[in-house]
Each structure stands twice: as structure tokens, then as C-alpha cells.
Image: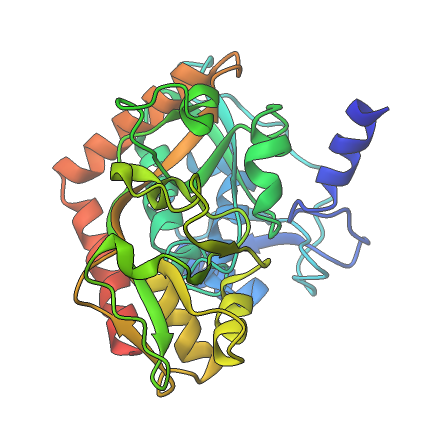
Amino acid sequence: MLGKLLPACLAMFVLLTNAASACGGLYRVKSGDTLTVVAERLYGDFGYWTVLHDANLDRIGIDPGRLKLGQTLLAPCVDGKPVGLEPATAALPRAPLSGGSGLSINVLSGDDYAPFADRDGLNGGMVTDVVLRALSVSPQVTNYQMIWVNDWAAHLDPLLSNALLDMGFPWEKPDCDADPDAGRCATFLFSDPLFEMLVLLFSRNDRPVPFRHDGDLEGRSICRPAGFATHDLDEGGRNWIRDHKISLIRPRSVQDCFQLLSEGMVDAVAVNEFTGRAALREMGLADRIRVEEARPVSLVTLHAVVARSHPQGEQMIAALNEGLARIRQDGTYQRIVGQHLALFWEGQ
């Protein structure tokens, strides 16, 4: 029964929906159009360029920049948009790309992880932008579909561990060399690093929590959202969780953590500096919460993961890694990261 229910429930999360005949249709490319421009025009959100790309792989190919003036694109119905287009009387069959036996990958991420994964952000966030660009130039990948599920705690298990979806991101990688049997190391394959960042401690201005030594946090209550990695809290012999040296509070979201902090229900929040600062800005708490910058909690890397049990897991990771290598070599990676970081710091 569970095997039947999970795919049925998963389908509710997929962006593409069955639509009435008035929704969706054909769009003709105009001068100056790109997929992001068309997505903004049709869906009101340039992040939906991936929907257009996936629906038109037979017309465009894996390079999303290959639009031609006057070309006809199929615009799928997503949440009732777009309307008023020429109806698509019949869906054209998908022609396989050259090679014919490439990988088709369902890629999973979620919101509430700005600036890395965020449907409201530029191209779905920094890491979304990097992953999809890398897949688009990887010669082994024929097709990919971006799927958003906001229950982060469900991503690793059951959605990815049971191969209900293929690849997920962005996930921190534990020290698998030191502990290869650690949960994530034993269960998942990791891509090459997508981004490196500091995890910092956030506390209230009127109740600061100085952090210069690991012992400074013993006896404290620390908040980190459910679904976020906690391996760094035990690494290097600190064993904060393993030896019950701290009380770890795990609400659903980063915003929930900062709400608990503002109400005095926890002593500090330990999350990466970007997601933490973005949440403070969104909640209007930046003037009440301080960042303990004397010492980071950890330095972590973000990765894409595929279950080791996935029959094509190794091929999928290898395909993504090849795409990453290509966009690093030609400077695309640096431009993507630079653009997203500039937007982030402009908002601080």
C-alpha cells in the first residue's frame, strides 16, 4: 500500500499540473526573448524557465540559450498560467537528443534555503542555477525536471532514499573519510562541491552567546531546522549532540528558529551565514539579532546527492560532475555565483 501511496502523494508536489483547455498553449519567440524572459511574461516568474525548457527539449535541445526568432514553444499549464495562448491541438512527441540513451533526471529541492534554493530568487537560487546549468551542458543528460517539495525532512527519506526522485540538493557532506558509515555517507553518493560556506552562531543583542571555544556552548539550547544537517555539531571531538552537551531544538524552518530566538525560547541559532542573514532580513529582526563572528561553528560544502541504491546513481553523479567541470572551466560557474552573491549582499 505504501508503495502506491507515496508516488500518488509525490505527484501533488510536481509543478506541472493537468489543466483546462484554456490554460497553456503555444508561444512564438519574439526578438529579445530568452527562456527567462518568456517565463516571466507567461508565468510571472523567471524561475519557471526550467518548465519551458523541459517541455521543449525536442525543439531547443539541452542548451536553453538556443531560441530562434519565430520558433514555436509549448507552454505547459502551471497553476492556471498562462492563458490566452494559441491552443496546442496535439502534443508533439519528444524526439530523443543525439545519443538517444542519455539520462533523464528528476531533480529535487525546496524553498526556505535562500540564497541557495528559493523559487522566488533569481533562477531558483544560486545552487539551483549551478546544478541546472551543469546538467544542461552535460553530454550524458538528455532530460531533467525540477521538482520543489518544501518538506525538507522528507527529502532524504523517503523521496531520495527510495529513489522516488533521482537527485537532491543542496546537502552538506559529512566527513565521510573519517566516518564512512555515517548515515548520509552510507546511504548517498555525493557530487563534487557546489559551494562552500561558513556556519555561524546567531544570538540576541541583549543576550549574547560568545563563541570562542567549543565549551562555550555547553548547557545552551541551540536551534537548527529539521532536515538540516547536524554532523558538524559532533565533528572534531566536540560531540555536542552525542554527549548531550547542548539541547538541540529542531522546528520546521529557519524562520521558526529565529522566532524562538526572538522570544527567548532558545539561546542561539546555528545556520549558514547566508540563510541566516536572509531570514533576519525577511523577518525584520536584523537589528535585534547579532552574528557571533569571532569563530565559525563550521566550514561546510554543499552537494547534490543520489541514493547509492539508485540503479543509475553513479552515472547521474558522474554526469553532473562533468557538467560542473565544464562550467567551471569556461567561467560560467564563477559568473553564476558572483551574480547571486552580488544580489544577496546588495540586500543586506
Asked if one can make out residue 88 in the rendered structure from this viewpoint, the answer is yes
User: Residue 216 versus residue 322: which sits nearer the camera?
Assistant: 216
Q: Position of residue 123 (x, y in %)?
A: 40, 56
Return the residue nearer the eye: 200 or 255.
200
The relative height of residue 236 versus residue 246 in the rendered view (above or below) is above
On screen, residue 71 versus residue 322, left or right, reads right
Q: Residue at x 56, y 47 (%)?
A: 152
Q: Quadrant of residue 89?
A: top right
Q: How many marks?
A: 0
- Looking at the image, residue 164 lies above or below residue 260: above
Query: Along the line of sight, which residue is nearer the eye, 27 or 210?
Result: 210
User: Percent from the top left, x then y, of residue 136?
Assistant: 36, 35
**Quarter of the image where the C terminus is located:** bottom left
- On screen, residue 17 versus residue 324, left or right, reads right
The quadrant of the image that shows the N terminus is: top right
**Extreme-right residue of the structure:** 1
Coloring basis for residues? rainbow
Can residue 62 be seen in this snapshot?
A: no
Q: Is residue 154 left or right of residue 8?
A: left
Residue 337 point in image, percent of width and height: 23, 54
User: Residue 84 appears at what percent x and percent y?
Assistant: 69, 65
Residue found at x 35% / y 88% = 287
At 35% from the left and 41% from the top, the residue drawn is: 239
